[in-house]
Structures are given as structure tokens and as C-alpha cells.
Amino acid sequence: MTETSAATRPLRIAIVGAGPAGIYAADALMKSDAEVSIDLYERMPAPFGLIRYGVAPDHPRIKGIITALHKVLDKPQVRLLGNIDYGSDITLEELRRFYDAVIFSTGANADRELRIPGIDLDGSYGAADFVSWYDGHPDVPRNWPLDAEKVAVLGVGNVALDVARVLAKTGDELLPTEIPPNVYEGLKQNKALEVHVFGRRGPAQAKFTPLELRELDHSPTIEVIVDPSDIDYDEGSEAARRHSKQVDMVCNTLEQWAIRDVGDRPHKLFLHFFEAPAEVIGDENGKVVGLRTERTQLDGTGNCKPTGKFTDWEVQSVYRAVGYLSQNIPQLPFDEQAGTVPNEAGRVLVDEDADGAARYLPATYVTGWIKRGPVGLIGHTKGDANETIACLLDDAPNFAPAADPDPESVTKWLEDKGIPFTTWAGWYRLDAHERSLGEPQGRERVKVVEREDMLRASEPHKV
Ligand SMILES: Cc1cc2nc3c(=O)[nH]c(=O)nc-3n(C[C@H](O)[C@H](O)[C@H](O)COP(=O)(O)OP(=O)(O)OC[C@H]3O[C@@H](n4cnc5c(N)ncnc54)[C@H](O)[C@@H]3O)c2cc1C
């Protein structure tokens, strides 16, 4: 292949990570005036990132966003190259050979650490691992121990609500969803009768969104309980309520729950505030038998200070839902503290020159959770993508053209390397297979878990 001027052919763009951020980036590129040809790389055999492997199975409306994303991937200017891991299957130099620019949208898939004594005990889990299990991720064990009658969930965001809700629901309540058979069998054995969610600060500081919070109360098996003494606000909290309708709605819901009588639904879900996790308590075999929390109180600004008053809660397992964390991307700078690739509006930032001017990695961009950290909803990744693509298009006239931009070259190279990559047509085959598994049971789909089974149904390389 001879070197071609990028001006006489479509811009060749690689996007690494086929979650919502990567797909919205492809959409923004195709909606621009530029002529583009895009390959969307994904390490899983199937696309859609955390929509498939994070969003809870009892949120079918959110999972349904996949249908809208189909319209993007149906376009002829974009190809899906799944089951390819950037870093091990393909490097940045190799991508540069085939593409004029590279966008990373690798998201986040691990748990942020919580450094308290006992956090590594048997029975103490990260929420991301549990979420991956119930969402049928191929790379986690098939069995999950659900033998605890009393469970603690640490954190007051939507992931904590998902974990608490799934733990408090029955397997049969979740059966109509897409959960795979091993997850249904596991949840049927779940012994949890009490789930205790702990927040270090107060109701006005909780990160729940109002809809997700109210949804807890919709299950016929879950009794949501809030202690009236946990409803407290200071000046900072009142200001937060005035500034944000969402914060105010969350506070109103929690207040209503705090003053009502406790009903008789069998599973109790307690939402505790002003209790900072201090230690996970273990027995002589290293198994979780409790959680120690320290009472906190508001300091006037909406922050909390410790009171020195400790409580021990009898629980047999602890789930920490204190945030997701992105992984370091090989050959890119990484801010370990923030868990992001340093960037300005999506341009990957290397450092500053002697005059303080930003130096960027040429033709390399980020978008989504890897760009701004693991917060925000699926919809937020759209704005992210638009900002990143605007920068890319501004820079495009100065791109060094790819040495081998022919789309067939890269797929031939992947085939020669023996990488069984999946395609967009392969997703349609897997999708049809999953739907056919659900049909006899009147379910929309049953998810395939094993990577080999996903690959078999997708038929790698076939377009
Ligand atoms: C448990 C949970 C529940 C959520 N529920 C909701 C909800 O109900 N509603 C809502 O709006 N939002 C929800 N969110 C938020 C939403 O999932 C995120 O906003 C969104 O997924 C972020 O998109 P992303 O594309 O940046 O990352 P991701 O969705 O993580 O996508 C990144 C993709 O990159 C791939 N990848 C990573 N590394 C590599 C590599 N080396 N090579 C190739 N591919 C790679 C990953 O496999 C993945 O497919 C939830 C998040 C979590 C964690």
C-alpha cells in the first residue's frame, strides 16, 4: 500500500472501546461535514460497554438505549471489531499505521479502593465484581456466595442502590429480565433478609438520582426504612437543596420514608446516613461478621466531622460501592489519582513546554468515563463525545496521514495474527441467539455468558 494523502480519502479513525462514549463519538464524526471511515475496537465479543455489563437487569428501559445505538452502528462508515484488546492484541504504533487518529473510550470497570481495616476479609466484595456477575460478564466466576442474612452496602450513589436492590429482591422477581441461568440459580439461594446501606454524610449529600431512589420502594418484597434521626440538614445542606432540584427531590423522598410506619414486606432495606465505615470486622477464620461505623455530624458547610461514637452492625457480608475506577491505558499518560487520561477537551495532554503551553499526544483523543472520570449517566457521554470530536476535526488538517489506510489492510493484519474478531453482523447473530433463548420463556432475551459461546454465536470474521 502506498502512502495516501488524507485529503483525498476519508479520514481513517480508530475508536477503542465500544461503550456509549465510543459509539456517540462515531455518531458525532458521521454527523460532521468530514468524510470518515471508522473502526470501533472492543475487547468484549459484544459492544455497548456498561449498558450491557453495568446497568442493572431490572432497568430494561435503560438497556433499551442499545436500540438507539444500533442506528449508529448500522451505518456503512463504521465497522465493529470486537474481541480485540487494545494493549495486548494491538498497540498504539500499530493503530497509527492504519489510522489517521485514535480515540480512546475505554470507560471504567474496576472498584475504587476503600482503605479501612478488614476490607480484604472473606465476605467483603467490590460492587463492580458483583455487578459483573449479575450482568453475566464472561471474565468473572460463575458462582457468587449469597449466604449472608444481613448485608452492608457502603456508598450512597446509584450503583449502591442497584446492588442493594438486587440483593433485596428475590430471584423470581428478576427472572423476567435478561439474567442468565447461573445468576437466577444464585439469586434463588440468596438468604439476605436485611440490607443496610451506609452513607458517611447526610441525605442532602447523597448522590442518588430521584428516580432510582423512588424505584426502591416499588418492589413488593422490599420495605425501605429510614431512621428519622438520620434526617438532618445544616446551612450547606439547605443551600444544596435550593440549588439542585434533584437534591431536594431526594431529600423529600427520604423524609417521607422516615416518617411513615414500617410495613410488612419481607426484605428490609435500611438507608443509614451519618455513619462512616470504620472497619470490617472478621471472625477467627477471617470471615466477615460485622461492620463498625463512626457517627458523623454536619459542620455547617455540608461537610461532616467524626463524633468518636462507634456502632457495630452484625452483617455477614459487605459490598463497597464507593465508585468505579478506570484502568491505565498502555502507552498513554495516566492520572492514577483521578483515574483518567490527562486531557484538555479530549486532546491527550502529555505535559507543558517551557513557556507553559500544553503539549498534546498527536492525533490521540479520549472521551467518556476515561476522559472525565466515572461519574454521570449514559446521556452525559454524548456531550463529551461532541466536545472531543470538535477538537479532532479542528486538528485534522495537520494529521500525519496513516501509512496503510486501506480498511482491508487492518482486517487482513488481524486475521494473519489469528485474532478471532467479531463484527457488527456478528452482534446481530448473537442478539438473535439471545432472543431465541428467551422466547420459549416469554422473556425478551437470556444473556449468553461464556466468551466461547458468545464467539460461537457471533461467528468471528464473518461480515
Ligand atoms: C453499575 C452501573 C450501573 C449504571 N446504571 C446506569 C443507568 O441505569 N443509567 C445510566 O444512564 N447510566 C448508568 N450507568 C452509567 C453508564 O454506564 C456510564 O455513564 C457509561 O457506560 C460510560 O460510558 P463509557 O463508554 O465511557 O464507558 P463504558 O460503558 O465502560 O465502555 C467502555 C468500553 O471500552 C471497552 N474497553 C475497555 N478497555 C479496552 C481495551 N483495552 N481494548 C478494547 N476495548 C476496551 C470496554 O469493554 C467497554 O465496552 C451505570 C454505571 C454503572 C457502573
Image (spheres, rainbow, N blue to C red):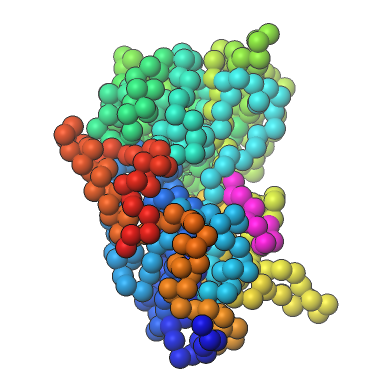
Find residue 460 and report its horizontal and vertical position in percent: 38, 54
Relative side of 460 to 177, left or right: right
Of helix, strand and loop, which mostly describes the magenta segment? loop
Which residue, as the protein is rendered here, is positioned at the far top?
Answer: 284
The residues colored magenta run 325-334
Residue 56 visible somewhere in the drawing? no
- Check if residue 331 falls in the magenta segment: yes
Relative side of 269 to 309, left or right: left
Residue 318 visible somewhere in the drawing? yes
State the quadrant of the C terminus.
bottom left
Find residue 170 and report its horizontal and vertical position in percent: 33, 22
Relative side of 418 to 186, left or right: right
Vertical placement of residue 396 versus 56, above or below: below
Residue drawn at (37%, 28%) of the image: 183
Which residue, as the protein is rendered here, is positioned at the far right?
Answer: 354
Residue drawn at (68%, 22%) of the image: 118
Q: Quadrant of residue 192?
A: top left
Vertical placement of residue 159 versus 258, above or below: below
